Amino acid sequence: MLAKIRHFFIEILGALILGLAVVVLTVNGTSDIFAGWKMEWSPRWLDVKTFFLSIVLEAIPFVLLGIFFSAFIQTFISEEQVRRWTPKSMIIGLPFAGLLGFLFPVCECAIIPVVRRLIQKGMPLPVGITFLLAGPIVNPVVLSSTYIAFTRQPDMALYRGVAGFAVAIIVGLLVFLFVKNNPLRLGMESQIRHEALHTEAVRGKLSATFSHAVDEFFDMGKYLLFGAFISALLQVYVSRDMLVNIGQTPLTSNLVMMGMAYLFSLCSEADAFIAASFSNTFQSSSLLAFLVFGPMLDFKTTLMLLSTFRFGFVVKLVVAVTVLVLAITMLMPV
Amino acid sequence: MDQTRLKRHYLIRSVILTGFTLLLTYLIVSEKLSHYLAPRLHMFSYVTLGILVILTVVSIRQAIVGANEYDCDCEDVHKVPRSPWISLIVYGLFLLPLAMGFLMPDKILGSDVAEKRGITLLSNDVRKLAEVAAATESAKSNTDIADNRNSTDPSLSAGDTKPAPEAGSEQVEESNQEQGPSDATQQEPADIEDEQIRKRFDTNGFGDFYTDLAVSLYKQPVIDLHEKVFLDGLTTMELYAKEFAGKEMEILGFVYRQTDFSAEQFVVARFSVSCCTADASVFGILVEKPDGSKWAKDSWVKVRGKLELRKVDGFDMLMLKANQVEPVKAPKDPYVYYSYDAASNS
């Protein structure tokens, strides 16, 4: 099942690239193709290029940050330390995980490998999931960037933090109550054991850290590039008026913004600026839905989750997060 | 998976990483990075360049030496694509930004994108634009009122009329060179005049930042809306639309038109960028000139004219009645940015 889905995504990906090649070659006049690459590019595609490169250039530093941070945990924090630091009781453990982002300010591209590593090192699953959802929102870097982006609406950062914290805790609680079996993907254990083997073998060796970083750069990079490319296409070809027309009632406009957050796959450290650019067209509650949903789930993180957790678990997680974000942002007095 | 195949993967990866390193170097050296990122993120790119260089070296070393340092039997989990087809697609995805970066010319964002996003005009959003265009009739009476108000205020007519500020403006220019614009307000002879202008802007209670900016803009005989004050300046004029009506202003930007504009109308606009161009939004002011259709869309112009007040839906909105439009070259950094330090003080 899972392999099929992955195949499916990869096939779409390939089709898109081939399609791009075809479009570029046909739209811009095949007669010029031998004229030393000096063909006329259609302005639309030049805009796609601008957006694509821009998002990639912006996100790469943060992805690298996450990669090295996860390598850091892997090398320097022992399982014992994680067990000792994580509270045993869920009443303290879940809020603790919700606020853990203040200690580890990582964005959503970086948090999946980090959480996987923490769960592997003995963190209870509900706590790990709460951290996974809250970490990319409730952290100083993201909240301050939200504050900067919404200079005229400084409350937004507060609402974003509170809503993100609430959704993460409730989902963590649901996981604690209802998920009894191990949701890690088949084969994950062996991979985790494998990685642990590496650390034992090469702990402290800088070159090993860097070669793992190269592996992870390519592993994460493909999701990032794919997400950035789709986002660039949407930015150039989809008019905002069209979206506004769909999102007329509070419910649909929240859903439209959440859908956009899912498709755009923006980094949580920068998405506030994009949300702010929508402030003329959407009401604040929809912007909040965008800001809370995007970091928790988007196109590329769903792919990344599928590489770590079982399919059924990911589906349940997606449903729970979607319903909760919708409910809480509709109820919040923004 | 045998060692040679693994080595081939590392070779491809080395080529890709080298490509990314070269692309980033090229963008930094040619100063084209600002076409993609806001200046405050440039620092991250320099760090990234350093890390990319290290990763490239590591990857090339792997390609030559092979993955011998791993003493385990675990190629599967080293995340190398399994089949040739998947490799082609995955690495193709990495080659796409490189190909685009090196082969496609740079283009700054223009009207096409502006149309998709909607443009923010002084104090009103795009949906009002049509109404503004239609509100030409009522405009005349409005500006008359504004002019009258100006002339009945004795403190302002002194600062407003052409001959008087000659001496004053020179003073300002001198002090600009010596101490920078913010200190200009502290100059002695201008002090009394300042106080009176300040009083005008103080009453609305929009905070010190906008009051200061309003005073410094108002004092210029011709308001120069250069890129440093573009966004904050527009916001200020939006807040004090009534006070600024009748002032002369000079503005630089690209020409943007919508289908519902009349032939003599266009917008002089700039893109503002917060992080990367994905969050760019458009700001501008409506310009009217009888031969306005002469300037092609997306061409860069410098416009000088008089600010006029229009009433749209009960809102006051400024537009620029141009008397001089000259074509200019696009500036090296085409985008404008909010000054966050200043904004956080407000």
Image (cartoon, helix red, strand yellow):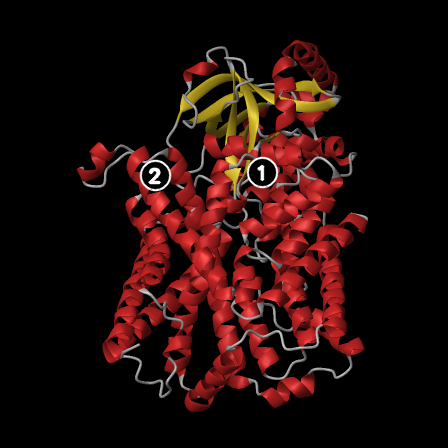
The quarter of the picture where residue A38 lies is top left
Picture layout, residue A245 above or below residue A201 = above
Tell whether A210 sits left or right of B249.
left
Q: Furthest residue to the front?
A: A1
Residue B56, horizontal then vertical, whole percent = 32, 69
Q: Is residue B331 visible?
A: no
Residue under circle 1? B231
Looking at the picture, which amino acid does disc 1 mark?
Leu
Q: Is residue B132 or residue A319 the one in the foreground? A: A319
Residue B204, horizontal then vertical, whole percent = 78, 34
- Characterize the local packing of mark 1: few (<14), some (14-19) or many (20 or more) Cα atoms within 10 angstroms: many
The chain holding disc 2 is: A
Name the residue located 64 percent from the left edge and 45 percent from the top edge.
A257
Picture layout, residue B194 above or below residue A53 = above
Query: Which mark, residue A23?
Result: 2
Q: Is residue A169 or residue B90 the one in the foreground? A: B90
Name the residue located 25 percent from the left edge and 80 percent from the top edge.
B65
Assign a secondary structure to mark 2.
helix
